[in-house]
Image: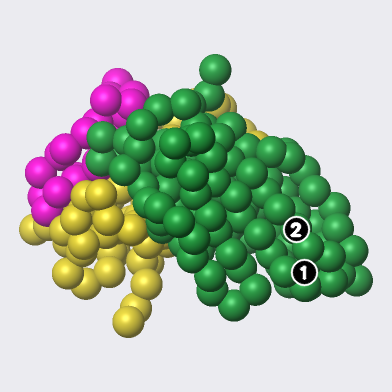
Amino acid sequence: EAGVAQSPRYKIIEKRQSVAFWCNPISGHATLYWYQQILGQGPKLLIQFQNNGVVDDSQLPKDRFSAERLKGVDSTLKIQPAKLEDSAVYLCASSLDTYIEQYFGPGTRLTVT
Amino acid sequence: KNEVEQSPQNLTAQEGEFITINCSYSVGISALHWLQQHPGGGIVSLFMLSSGKKKHGRLIATINIQEKHSSLHITASHPRDSAVYICAVFLGGNLIFGKGTKLSVKP
């Protein structure tokens, strides 16, 4: 069974530029999560999708972050414009449903200079 | 105060040692995850448990719901076990993560 795929693995941008990350969850997984992990901290949930609907985006900085999950499969997370404090690893995870074990992708390491 | 506290933050061990990482949480939960994160960022789920004990190879996880405490044990540790171990609890359908324990196993 293929795992959660993410791309790119690494990205370096200047502040005020835009960036997009892509996630392909495990086939059949209805729930998809985007997490932000700042160095030295545990991951923080940014947004949770159930199929193509948003379940929880309470911690998503909506003035600069956006995410979508078209057709309930792949998802993209966008930052526009980026700030220095956005430097982090962005993790995508998926699960069959909520309250069930999550499977994580390899993450995208973003550096904003 | 974090809802999930892990100890120790950093741990250095010699190959072959028995290792224990602790996790305490302050809220009622439905289940708890132990996760492993290697340099480079990828996270692997080790265990999800809501009661008792689970074992997989050299890894053992226990949870005491009444005491709001879980432990992850590694027997006969090996340098390839070097990683960050993260405890996360299910709360309201979301995972709340601890800050992780960085383990280094020296040969």
Residue placed most toward the observer, B33 or A19? B33
Dot 2: element: strand
Colour that chain B carries in the picture:
green
Colour that chain A carries in the picture:
yellow
| Residue A96 pos. (x, y %) | 21, 62
Dot 1: element: loop
Q: Is residue B28 visible?
A: yes
Chain of the residue that carries numbered disc 2 in the rendered image: B
Looking at the picture, the colour scheme in use is: by chain
| Label pair 1/2, CB-CB below 8 angstroms | yes
| Residue B94 pos. (x, y %) | 31, 39
| Residue A38 pos. (x, y %) | 56, 36
Magenta range is: A45-68
Q: Quadrant of residue B24?
A: top right
Q: Circle 2 is placed at which residue position?
A: B19
Dot 1: few (<14), some (14–19), or many (≥20) neighbours within 10 Å? Answer: many
Q: Amino acid at mark 1?
A: Ser
Residue at position x 19%, y 46% in the image: A49
- Whether B79 is drawn above or below A50: the answer is below
